[in-house]
Image: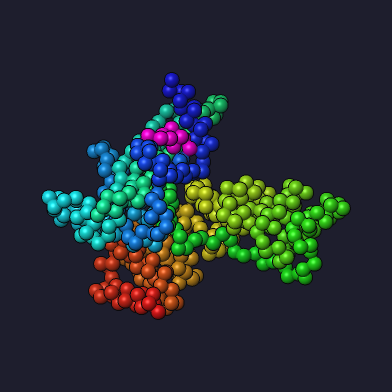
Amino acid sequence: MKLPLILMIFLLGMTGCATRYIERSADYADRNPESIKTADTIIEAVNDVVIFESSPELKSSPLPCLAVFPITSREIDIKAAESIRSAMHAHLAPTGIRLIALQRVDSAIKSADPSKGDLNASVAQLIGCDNIMLGEVTEDTSRFYGVYSEVRAGARMKIIRASTGELLWQGSHTAVLRGGGVPFGMVSLAMNVVFAGLNLFGDQGVRVVHDLARRLVLSIPNLAYQDESLPITESPTLAEVESHSPQTAYGMIASLESLTPDQTRLRLTEELKSNRWTDLRDRVLIADALVRVDDGQPIGYYESALARMQLSEPAMALPNAQRAVTLQPESADSQFLLGRIQLAMDQPQEAIAPLVKAVSLGRGKGIHLIALGTAYNQIGDYPRAASSFAKVLARDADNGYALLHGAIAQAGMGSSKEAVRMLRRSMIVGIARMDPSRANRALNILRAMDLAKLMPEGEIDILESKIKSLKVS
């Protein structure tokens, strides 16, 4: 019985590369209070599904603050509970929400008097934040089947208002890393045994926990990475031409019917390189028309993928980006676009290879290094993330994104003093540039990671006062 089950899981798992987010409506949850616990267990296991539910209040207004409480688990899963809690906190930090430092939460839990009513409410009152995140470990396993292996991390999390017990959000997910597969010959058998074994060693346990945390954070509305985003690509330089084309892209394409294929290809390429078509839907139409005329034109696939990415359609952009890279593997722009699309599709591990190549081909261009550092941060590879952001900051010491996310990487490595230096720099630059949002994000991350105590006495209060004065003005 085991072999058919392994085969089914492997084949289904291979088709479920992209994470799917399934939201339960409020009335569904009312009618099925156990739905989060019981529904879609097999589907979630093999298709990377995040099942979540959000209250109408949370959808309409963001959380002012959040405290991540210790996660419950069986005794054998205590280390997994600690890792998941730390990873959730790390992936919440860049979102801009005011996080309560884990050490402060733990200290409040120890000092709270359980005899004075609900412990959660008492702790929330002590830390000055009524929104708390609770959770439990649902899975922490590694399985080896000879030719196939899995590393799994699962959790069921929720955010409640501690004073009333009101549920604001809940989500459950099991992240799975798979190695090996079904052998189709002796060579394949030997390789799959090796890959299945390698999957159980190294940093795979760290990676799967960060996959779990990142995906759960992304399902929380009004929270996940709203304040800033990665650049999709540098804006292309379009040739300035006089506008003599038909009014619509449809009309322009229709006007080419009498031309030869070569003439049509040249004309469509010229149109894509010109500044006539700024509407993204028009660019998709023209690029797709070029691909139909000549499926060996990398510019057609690239421009179609770029426009769809800018239209927030990464899943539709992905095949065209992959084809552009196949046709033009030495193009830094194509490699970067592919990696950026994979990041948008919640595939940071897959994004690393094209982003590394983009960095190499583009000679360390800033936007390539930023995207690569983000991918490394998301899988918990903090040393490589820190290295990527450091290279950006060596050329642009005030780069806001690199300062904030580089600080997170430094903190993840245990380099607290360097993290503080970078966050302090980010606050100062934000104040100098009259940018309270940026300065406040750095301040929140500093406090969330319990790093404020490493700054000179009184300096944090001075910086906070200046940030507040920016908000008022």
Q: Is residue 40 magenta?
A: yes
Horizontal arrangement in the rendering, residue 461 relative to residue 435 (left or right): left
Horizontal arrangement in the rendering, residue 321 relative to residue 148 (left or right): right
Q: Position of residue 333 (x, y in %)?
A: 62, 58
Residue ID at (73%, 70%)? 240
Q: Position of residue 321 (x, y in %)?
A: 62, 50
Q: Residue furthest top?
A: 1
Q: Is residue 435 magenta?
A: no
Foreground: 64 or 212?
64
Horizontal arrangement in the rendering, residue 395 relative to residue 118 (left or right): right
Q: Residue furthest left?
A: 115
Residue 425 visible in the shown view: no
Residue 20 visible in the shown view: yes
Residue ID at (67%, 67%)? 237
Q: Position of residue 229 (x, y in %)?
A: 49, 61
Locate residue 128: give its quadrant. Answer: bottom left
Foreground: 35 or 339?
35
Locate residue 27: give its quadrant. Answer: top left
Residue ID at (68%, 51%)? 301
In the depicted structure, whether residue 376 falls above or below residue 433: above
Q: Write the start and end of the magenta stretch as one range.
A: 38-47
User: Quarter holding the N terminus?
Assistant: top left
In the depicted structure, whether residue 11 falls above or below residue 309: above
